[in-house]
Image (spheres, rainbow, N blue to C red):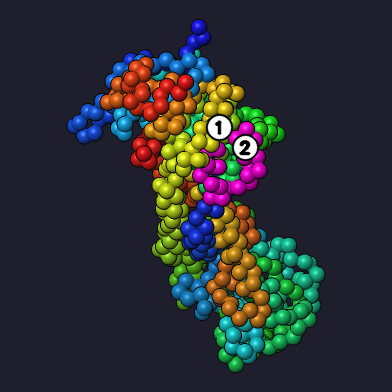
Amino acid sequence: MYKLAFLVAKNLGRNKIRTALTASAVVVLVMIYTVVSTITSTISDAMAAHSSETRLLVRGRWMVRAGFPRRFVPRITNLPGVLDWTVWNFYGGALDESGQEDRTAAGIATRVENLREMHPGLEDLDPAVIDALRRERTGMLVGQKLMKTMRWNVGQRFTFISATHPGQNLEFKVVGILPEGDYSGMCIFRDDYYEEGTGDKERVRIVWLRVADPAAGNRIASQLEAMYASGDTPLQVETESATANRVLSEHQSIVAIIRFIAAILLIDMAIVLSNSINIATQERRIEMGVLKVLGFAPAHVAFLVVGEAMLIGALSGLVGAGLTYAYSQVNDWEGWPYKIQFLSDLRIQSDVVPWGFVYGALIGLAGSVIPAWNARRIRVADVFSRVA
Amino acid sequence: MSSPALQLEDVHKEYVRGSERIEVLRGLDLRVRDGEFLGLMGPSGSGKSTLLNLIAGLDRPTSGRVIVGDEVVSEMDEAEIARWRSAHVGFVFQFYHLIPVLTAFENVELPLLLFNMPASRRRQQVHTTLELVGLSHRVDHRPGQLSGGEQQRVGIARALVTDPTLIVADEPTGDLDGHTSEEILDLLEALQASLRKTIVLVTHDPRAARRVHRLVRLEKGVLLEGSDDALAEAVPGWPMN
């Protein structure tokens, strides 16, 4: 059968305009599909990264932003079963005065002591960076993407123009870089500097607890909620996984719409390919009859049809996914004039390229089923009686 | 006496169109000797192409048997018949039916791709066959770059390349001018003489009919054979010798 592959390749060159138009349509659809499916995979990855049952998030029941009294912290963190803990306060704004959207960042003020242990994704952070943050009170760890955008190096000093704490702009010195991933657009700095700099010494926004096992997590969560239920500031305690699921469920309909669009795109690709291959098959009925006269079995004829669709699909998928990946890289270049902001927020990985090839081939396979079935059923006598 | 290369036994063929039943072939009996060059003539609609399709295993008789060599072609299933046809029948078409995106070489090579043979041997066989039909200088040309006569030579080479038992030619000169027709007939005659192939030639062309060893006529689904008067009526100048 493989010997017939050259005929499949030659067939692509028959009607170059049609082949080019079909391939272009599939390339565009693959590009859109790649972006759309990256949105859902980004959400899935985020869910997977935050699915711990042994990390508890403690916050004020009614408003995260308002937080809860810092004096609660010792009592919360001293509960039996709590292995480790940290706090979060938020400090967001602009990294310079340009007003450009890609130069804004969210900052988290937290404890340095157990930064790596309490932050999934930072486990491999260089201990020297932690040391530097411990030594430098105004130190800040800045996400890789921000460093690239700002063209900064470690040692850079700057004024963070706060949007969350108007008039309380803090001075920072970059002492390390946060890795690619959840933190690439964020900054982390010391909670004691936050307290001192903003004067916000009485409240915390979030306390994270690490517990031994899910059972302990459930017990502590119930205990904490009960302890503060009747006070001025009731607490809400849930596992990281529950938080992620709650956030996801709040956006469930949007995720469902995105998945529906992705499915429609796949079907659309199959229809485009099927239509093109069907026209080609109709045009080549006589040739297929000739092949059967020469001794080609119905399976051989079907192979030629399926092979052609899969080849167009695979090549178009490769090009479409490749272009999307390439553009996502170019899009991150500083000074690139045609920047698509949302593309920077998606992490389009290089593995979309081989997957584009595979998906394209499979779409080609799906789209060629009916034309191939029709082609294998061509009756030679019927074809030649029409010619005569 | 050698066994016949082709034998038809009481072959009937009917088509059903709506409620109408059309009987195209009515109980044909025919024996073609090994190495014989048989001509088949008849008016349009007499069933020539239908008969040719049955002989080449492209269609099945409604009843009766088609035997080529020792094989009962009419009783094979579709996969068997495809395998059998690739090895035992070469087909020459009136309109050549070459694959336009392939070169002359690739067109001739096509039937050999179905065989399990080394590429070097396959290439050798294609070159030899193209040389046999006088086209060794046009191997890399596509059908669109060849004249009608040259395309038909490629068609003949494609029919010959598998070294088949039987060659079936359906009006091979029907689309060619007089001079080119003669050249193609010369080629078929020479190939038949040198390779001792059994050829069944369907034709309307008296020039073609004069080249065959034996001529049969098909009229209204019935074969007429052996009457020199009838043949002389059909073919001016018959018999040739």
User: How many numbered badges does the structure rendering display?
Assistant: 2
Comparing A317 with B181, the one in front is B181
Amino acid marked by disc 1: Leu
The furthest residue to the left? B19
The residues bearing labels 2 and 1 have C-alpha atoms spaced at a distance of 9 Å
User: Which residue is located at x 31 percent, y 34 percent?
Assistant: B44
Look at the image and tell me whether residue B32 can be seen: yes
Residue where numbered disc 1 is placed: B187
Question: Residue A312: image x %, image y %?
Answer: 53, 53
Residue where numbered disc 2 is placed: B134
Comparing A278 with A290, the one in front is A290
User: Which residue is located at x 38 percent, y 33 percent?
Assistant: B204
Question: Residue B8: image x %, image y %?
Answer: 39, 17
Look at the image and tell me whether residue A139 can be seen: no
Comparing A367 with B211, the one in front is B211
Question: Residue A198: image x %, image y %?
Answer: 63, 87
- Quadrant of the image occupied by residue B228: top left
SS class of the residue under badge 2? Answer: loop
The residue range painted magenta reads B129-153
Label 2 is found on which chain of the structure? B
Q: Which mark is residue A278?
A: none
Question: Residue A261: image x %, image y %?
Answer: 43, 61
Tell me, yes or no, whether the highlighted magenta stretch contains residue B134. Answer: yes
Above or below, A89 against B19 in this view is: below
Q: Are marks 2 and 1 in contact (CB under 8 Å)?
A: yes
User: Which residue is located at x 57 percent, y 82 percent?
Assistant: A101
Amino acid marked by disc 2: Gly
Tell me, yes or no, whether the highlighted magenta stretch contains residue A69. Answer: no
Q: Which mark is first along the chain, 1 or 2? A: 2
- Judged by its main secondary structure, the magenta piece is helix
Above or below, B152 against A216 in this view is: above
Label 1 is found on which chain of the structure? B
